[in-house]
Amino acid sequence: TLLSKNGFQVVDFGDGATALAWLKDNTPNSMLCDILLPDMNGSDILAFVRQKPNGDKIPVIAATGFAKINDREKYLEMGFDGYISKPINTATFVQEVKDYIEAKRS
């Protein structure tokens, strides 16, 4: 809702399999990916995206409730371009997403 209200076109999926099916025929401009999905890990989605033509240019941001001391570094090392812990801060969330997208494109 926050992203939609701020000009983002959002496509939402309830599980990883549905997201992967969509990604087979579509290439997003950017992605916000939960790490813990009902049927797989968000890193599986990241791996699929990175294998697409120009997939390395797509900003993929991890969103997760895993917020231990080294989790941010762990997910960035996995290849995510950004990391946002839950619960999100509604006052800064949209700007954080924009900043990660802009940093990837710079």
Image (cartoon, rainbow, N blue to C red):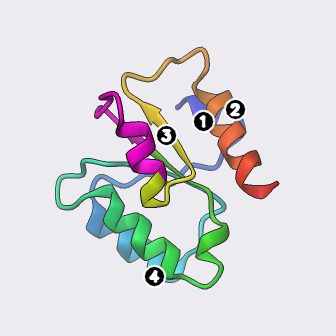
Residue 83 circle label = 3
C-alpha distance separating marks 3 and 1: 16 Å
Secondary structure found at label 3? strand
Secondary structure found at label 1? helix
- Viewer-proximal residue among 37 and 102: 102
4 and 2 marks in contact (CB < 8 Å): no
State which region is magenta: 63-76
Residue depicted at 74% across the width and 47% down the height: 103
Residue 32 circle label = none
Q: Amino acid at mark 2?
A: Asn
The residue identified by callout 4 is 24
> Is 66 one of the magenta-colored residues?
yes
The answer to whether 63 is drawn above or below residue 38 in the figure is above
The residue identified by callout 1 is 3
Secondary structure found at label 2? loop
Residue 6 circle label = 2
Tell me the quadrant of the picture where the C terminus can be found: bottom right
Q: In the image, residue 60 lies at what x, y percent?
A: 54, 55
> Is 50 one of the magenta-colored residues?
no
